[in-house]
Image: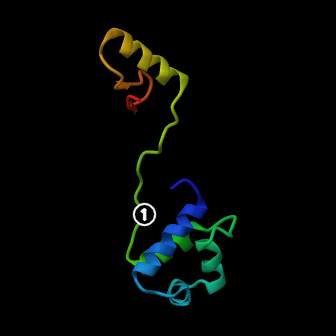
Amino acid sequence: MDSLTDLGHAVATLRKKRKMTQRDLASLSGLGQSTLARFETGGVPEFGARKLLRVLEVLGYEMSFTPGRRTFTLDDALAERQAEASGTGGNQFSRDVDTWSAPR
């Protein structure tokens, strides 16, 4: 997930899988229904960590972390070119980071 809007949409999906209404989830989480509705639709500029953790708890989920996606850089392109020229193919780890670049 890359944004608060994506997170809100994911919560809405989890809520619907549990066959809960916004009113039910909001009430069990200690939130107003309108606050939850705005969060699920990307209409809030901020949503506190405690609120999020409580909503996830009520839904039966918890947070976990995964490494973020890294953008393809000029260093990655150079490493690919060098690998292709040396005959080792295009699959190459960048020398500075632990990221794999797939061949095109």
For the point 38% across and 28% down, which residue is it?
103
For the point 47% across and 73% down, which residue is it?
13
For the point 30% across and 12% down, which residue is it?
87
Work out whether residue 10 or residue 85 is closer to the camera in this orientation and state it.
85
Name the colour scheme.
rainbow
Which residue position holds label 1? Answer: 63
Q: Residue furthest front?
A: 104
* Whole-percent x, y for residue 95 in the image: 41, 21
* Whole-percent x, y for residue 98 in the image: 39, 31
* Whole-percent x, y for residue 81 in the image: 43, 16
Q: Residues within 10 Å of mark 1 (few under 14, many from 20)?
A: few
Work out whether residue 67 or residue 102 is closer to the camera in this orientation and state it.
102
| Residue 6, above or below 57 | above
Q: Residue furthest top?
A: 86
The quadrant in which residue 61 appears is bottom left
| Residue 93, above or below 67 | above
Q: Residue furthest left?
A: 88
* Whole-percent x, y for residue 80 in the image: 42, 20
The quadrant in which residue 30 appears is bottom right
What type is the residue that disc 1 sits on?
Met
State how many labels appear: 1
Work out whether residue 9 or residue 27 is closer to the camera in this orientation and state it.
9
Q: Secondary structure at mark 1?
A: loop
The reply to whether residue 61 is visible in this rendering is yes
Q: Quadrant of the C terminus?
A: top left
For the point 51% across and 21% down, which residue is it?
75
The reply to whether residue 32 is visible in this rendering is no
